[in-house]
Amino acid sequence: MNKKRFSIFIAVIAVSLSLTLLLTACSPVTLTKIKSSSFESIFAEYSDDKYHKVNQSAYKSVCKSGLIEMFFDESTASVGILDTSSNVFWSALPSDSEEKALGFSAIEAVLLTESGKQYELNTQDSSVCFGNFSFEKTSNGVNVKYSLSLDAETGKADTSALPENSVRADITVSYTLSDGSFYASVNTNNLALPKGVYIEKIRLLNSFGAYSDQNTDDFIFVPDGNGAIIKTGVPDPEFTPVSLKVYGDDPAVSTGKASAPLGAFGIKHGKGAFLCIIENGDSIADINAYRLSETSLNSVGAEFSVTDINTESKKSGQQKTVGNTYNGGLVLCYRFLSGKSATYSGMAAACRENLIRNSVISSKTVSTDGSSLPLIVNLQFGFYDSNGNFTVKSTFEQAQALMTLLKAKGVNNVYLNAVGLFTDANNGNSEDFGSFLKQLGNRQKYDSLYSYMKTQNFLMYIDTNILSVKKSSSDRAKNIFGSKIKYSSANSNPNMSASTGSYLKMSELENRIESLLDSSSDISFDGFALSDIGTVLYSDYSSDFYPRESSKKEIASLIPVLSSNKPVMINKGNFYSIKNVSIISNIPQSTVSRTENEAYCGVPFASLILHGAYDYSLNSINLSNNPEETFLRSVEFGAVPSADWYCVNTNAEDAYGYNNNINEIVAYCVKANDILADLRDARMTSHYKVQDGVFCTEYNNSTKVYVNYTEEPVKINGITVNARDCIKIS
């Protein structure tokens, strides 16, 4: 692109992004600090079983849509859904046949008062038992207003006349049917609260579908890693409740929970199943799952952190800092499944349809042109250590020699992710993105590398962090206390530097993108590899305040600018960020919140959604403690193989040194290509366990891939799958 055209292109980007920023940036938030020797939670007094359980005969039909029908119980102000295709009834409250009286409710709310009290209220003990609710039936559902309080009088009083710090919250929930789906929604703009009261959390329909059966085939789905199922019929004495933060922790507030790449969860119980997708409010949602115990049924639901609240321990007690309150909708969409679709594969198919319909993911298919399955090579060119010293790990000449060697050994498609190609490309600032590294070789050597790759139809990606900065203090985002949001991550390889720095102000994204495009404008390459966008999401408490939801939208909006005429690779891939990318690298191959066992099993839920629309990889094979098992998992999950390498001379124990494991990686690539190359644009339709240690993945072109992790060959329908091996049946 010539300089004039480039300037015009930048100007267009600047205008469009500026308009977007003006629409989403907010005024600074007034912070409130609440101090107390302790913040003891005060719970509503338990009323009666009759408010917490429902006799199905008490439900009255409200409306129908497709194969589902909504019912409403006027005595408990709760809903139920009948899936007429399976005759399975799903209730917001447990049936009165349940022996346990555990106090389940339609809605729960956590309130914080400026007087330093924290209250946990619920619709059944804080509203319904007092008669402090009202409902209005509509053509497609019912709207219910719950007035939550500790006593009947407070719930009946006019909100505007209540004394300051009164314990009261009015929450209106809309239960509707549309296009064969059930929706539960709350508009947080319509919450009614007395002065001095903050609504910290809302738990919406957390007991929907809760059950105590222990059937072998029943399970709870949670988005842990690639996906996980909790087999409720398999004993798990070490189980602790699962809690996952959608899109990971907000480092501006900090919660310390494991990350989920998408907001979805589900239950398979008896003949039916449902999948719930968080359509609005996903950026502030946690997903919590429980097994049957003395205090819970088998259940899963969403909890929304409506107000940013950070808790600190002080010498005098605790201090809570109250920040932004989310203004927008909380929307849950339930899809119901039966028969052969009542599986996690069926849930994934329903989730994919929903995400495509809502323009969250792409409806495209991978363009293969008959090419081989790619090998993603994350090649470290160089890095700066904490003292500012630069270390070369791969020169351009060495990189070309590696590409030539891979080609000679039979690898016919490579995506080279060039890490550290630019000065401070992975920790720069927004004003000066970085310059081409002279230490790696001259321009002629780089052009020779790229020219060779083009002749072989290999692709070159420039790896960079968009949201991470080091140098400037003026362009760094701030946390809820007004301090710079800092990050620090160790590197397990002693020959590589740890990563430290701060996160970029959201209002500086325009400058950051301009700088990236400008720095790379005269370099020949094929696309960008974005290291941090798919892994971190934060609020920005700078003067140009961005709540987490606005940050989500800003980050998603910049990717089309980078992908307008180049493919984009993204790391790990929080789902809000992937619509316009081509490749997703490093999707977790195992669960991240806990170790897998017989009752808590990793499944390829994300893969079932993504396959055919995106190329994606799991963890790098050469860095795995068990490379063979990582390779087999990649085949099982339909992923392309990947390796993390550098080219400097290394000792024989260094897994990053390509000369130590290239033959092993090439053998895996050749095997994976034979099985998966012609499936890249196919939809993955089903995945299941055939027997212990043996799994099958099915595609929409009638292909099956079997993977055998055991030490013995296995015969399936007359086909032998060798020990520690995989096979494709077309």
Image: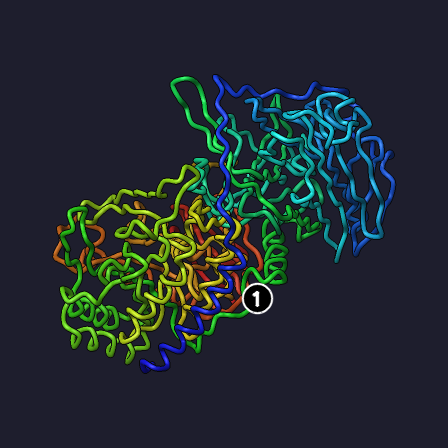
Badge 1 density bin: few <14, some 14–19, many ≥20, Cα 10 Å: few
Q: Where's residue 398, x and y in %?
A: 16, 67
Residue 168, above or below 335: above
- Which residue is at a point 20% across and 49% down the rendered structure image? 496
Q: Quadrant of residue 661?
A: bottom left
- Which residue is at a point 64% across and 29% down the rendered structure image? 297
Q: Name the residue nearer the viewer: 255 or 258.
A: 255
- Which residue is at a point 27% across and 74% down the rendered structure image? 523
- The image's colouring method is rainbow
Instruction: Answer with left or right where residue 649 lies relative to residue 163.
Output: left
Q: Where's residue 80, x and y in %?
A: 78, 40
Q: Name the residue nearer the viewer: 96 or 192.
A: 192
Q: Quadrant of the N terminus?
A: bottom left
Q: Name the residue nearer the viewer: 610 or 446.
A: 446
Q: Amino acid at mark 1?
A: Ser
* Label 1 secondary element: loop
User: Residue at label 1?
Assistant: 702
Instruction: Answer with left or right where residue 574 lies relative to residue 220.
Output: left
Q: Is residue 97 visible?
A: no
Instruction: Answer with left or right where residue 483 lies relative to residue 108.
Output: left
Q: Name the residue nearer the viewer: 530 or 89.
A: 530
Q: Quadrant of residue 527?
A: bottom left
Q: Where's residue 131, x and y in %?
A: 82, 27
Q: Is residue 23 visible?
A: yes
Q: How many marks?
A: 1
Residue 252, above or below 401: above
